[in-house]
């Protein structure tokens, strides 16, 4: 009987030891998960193409007959936020800049921006827009001066090669995470959806810009 009790006690001891060993946590398993480090980037794609990368360099302020809604069809290769809209103004004034949803052809954001001087780019804050990667958007501005309801010059920005203006199509153009697919235009000063045009695909028109913020 004593022998049976001793055997049972030994078995119990080994079972407890085995369970304890199975439930032990190794040092590697006990390490906390380290957060992934990210960096926030802020870009102004048109301004950067013009000043930094110098893909587009020559300004021609054309006094056109009437008003035009003009800009670009574009997409972003990563998700992020648009926090500001901007405009490169051919003259001083107040100009409308609009961000459009291509799928629904509807306005996402539209704002009037003050431009105190000509041939400079000015920006204004908007309620941030969540950008979906690879979804197409249109960014446009109108050459009507909404400050005094007059029609102003329309800036055309051309690409140069070896100091000469390029008349062939220049799209697509990519800066960082933004790709410009084509130019768009629509006659008139109404808030009306502009469409891509092969007639203006050798230049930037308008010219609208934006501030895009993303993380990597």
Image (cartoon, rainbow, N blue to C red):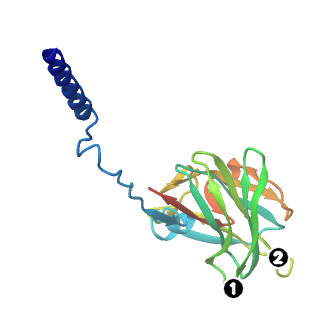
Which secondary structure lies at badge 2?
A: loop
In which quadrant will I find the N terminus? top left
Name the residue tied to disc 1.
Answer: 116
Q: Is residue 142 visible?
A: no
Question: In terms of image quadrants, where is residue 152?
Answer: bottom right
Disc number for residue 100? none
In the picture, measured across the screen, residue 62 lies left or right of residue 212, that is: right
Disc number for residue 146? 2
Q: Is residue 149 above or below residue 12?
A: below
Q: Residue at x 18, y 19 (%)?
A: 5
Q: Residue at x 73, y 55 (%)?
A: 100
Q: Position of residue 92 (x, y in %)?
A: 72, 82
The CA span between labels 1 and 2 is 13 Å
Q: Is residue 136 visible?
A: yes
Which residue occupies the extreme left position in the image?
A: 3
Which secondary structure lies at badge 1?
A: loop
Q: Position of residue 25 (x, y in %)?
A: 27, 41
Q: Position of residue 153 (x, y in %)?
A: 74, 73
The reply to whether callout 1 and callout 2 are in contact (CB within 8 Å) is no
Decide which of 151, 161 is in the foreground and name it.
151
Local crowd size for mark 1, using a 10 Å CA cut-off: few (<14), some (14–19), many (≥20)? some
In the picture, measured across the screen, residue 167 lies left or right of residue 147, that is: left
Q: Residue at x 24, y 30 (%)?
A: 16
Label tally: 2
Question: In terms of image quadrants, where is residue 19?
Answer: top left
């Amino acid at each position: 009987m004593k022998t049976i009790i001793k055997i049972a006690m030994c078995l119990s001891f080994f079972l407890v030891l085995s369970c304890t060993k199975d439930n032990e946590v190794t040092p590697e398993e006990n390490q906390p998960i380290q957060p992934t480090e990210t960096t926030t980037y802020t870009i102004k794609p048109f301004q950067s193409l013009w000043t930094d990368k110098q893909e587009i360099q020559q300004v021609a302020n054309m006094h056109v007959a009437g008003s035009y809604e003009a800009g670009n069809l574009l997409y972003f290769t990563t998700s992020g936020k648009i926090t500001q809209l901007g405009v490169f103004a051919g003259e001083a004034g107040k100009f409308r800049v609009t961000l459009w949803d291509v799928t629904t052809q509807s306005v996402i954001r539209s704002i009037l921006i003050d431009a105190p001087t000509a041939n400079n780019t000015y920006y204004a804050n908007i309620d941030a827009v969540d950008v979906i990667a690879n979804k197409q958007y249109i960014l446009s501005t109108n050459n009507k001066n909404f400050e005094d309801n007059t029609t102003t010059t329309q800036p055309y920005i051309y690409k140069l090669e070896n100091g000469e203006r390029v008349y062939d199509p220049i799209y697509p153009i990519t800066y960082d995470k933004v790709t410009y697919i084509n130019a768009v235009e629509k006659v008139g000063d109404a808030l009306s959806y502009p469409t891509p045009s092969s007639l203006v695909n050798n230049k930037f028109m308008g010219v609208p810009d934006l501030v895009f913020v993303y993380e990597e």
